[in-house]
Amino acid sequence: MKKSRSLTMSICLLCILGLAIIPASAGLKDTLQSDEFDGSKLSEMWSIDNPDIGSFKVGGGKLTVTGGFNGNVWGNSDALFFYQEVSQQNFDITTDFIHDYQGGSTVAGLLVESETTKDTKARDGEWVTLKLWGRGGGDNNAVLQYQRRENDSEADGYVGIWGENDADKTYQPDAGQISISLRLKRDGDIYESWFKPEGKGDWVWVGKVTSALKDPVKVGIYAGIAEEGGDATLTNTFHNFIEASSAVTAVDPQNRLTTTWGHLKDQ
């Protein structure tokens, strides 16, 4: 009994001192919170999946991710993923970022993931993601994708490559520094998405899908290199993560002027 009591007290002391190895998690939240990445460290509102895939730093109003290999979001969700876990049936999220890549395949975007929902192949884990896919090889340009796990069926509203085979909608910026804004809105089981090429101008509609993701869901931003190795490099700089109903005032990523959400959503 004395040994058991001593062990319990020792574990408690380690936890208090922060020395015990405990998985980092911010826990389940009532609603999503916005973040403009002020300060010099990541806010405690965030949890992280795949912390060994790449690295990150916070400073100057930015979350800068150095992409790591094996960091794709397709067959599995393997990228460095910053998320908040919620059971929130309605939200409207955006992020503004610069995707600077060379030499291979890279990804970054918004992700809503449910670990308890079966995917189209009956595997545990399903999601909806709006992402920028930086392509290497002969393409050496980036495209926009709207997908679920290992599936982007157009018949169900998903988008393998936005604007493909439509000259009026072509979006294929060359590899290098790419500015972009992404937006994803949930209304129950309905998920709708938009983007802003070069991170400015009007919101351009991408698609609307129905996905019965079971709550709670992990909601957030990610970046990674979608290759096992090689010469690919990625520096992804997130300027913000904004949820429309959050009390935090949104910021225009081009000139850092504050603006109201009503103004942003009308653009």
Image (cartoon, rainbow, N blue to C red):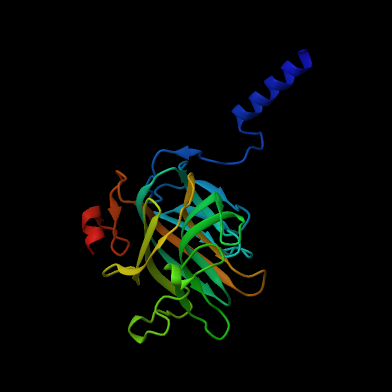
The answer to whether residue 140 is above or below residue 190 is: below
Q: Quadrant of residue 233 in the image?
A: bottom right
Tell me where residue 165 appears, x and y as whole percent.
Answer: 41, 85
Tell me where residue 229 appears, x and y as whole percent.
Answer: 67, 70
The answer to whether residue 158 is above or below residue 252 is: below
Tell me where residue 59 appears, x and y as whole percent.
Answer: 44, 53
Q: In the image, is 107 to the left or to the right of 185? A: right
Tell me the quadrant of the picture where the N terminus can be found: top right
* Residue 145 visible in the picture: no
Tell me the quadrant of the picture where the C terminus can be found: bottom left
* Residue 1 visible in the picture: yes
Q: In the image, is 3 to the left or to the right of 171? A: right
The answer to whether residue 199 is above or below residue 37 is: below
Q: Residue at x 38, y 46 (%)?
A: 89
Residue nearer the viewer, 148 or 255: 148
Tell me where residue 168 appears, x and y as whole percent.
Answer: 32, 84
Question: Could you tell me how many numbered marks the image carries?
Answer: 0
Residue nearer the viewer, 249 or 147: 147
Q: In the image, is 171 to the left or to the right of 119? A: left
Q: Residue at x 35, y 48 (%)?
A: 90
Q: Residue at x 62, y 29 (%)?
A: 15
Residue nearer the viewer, 225 or 57: 225
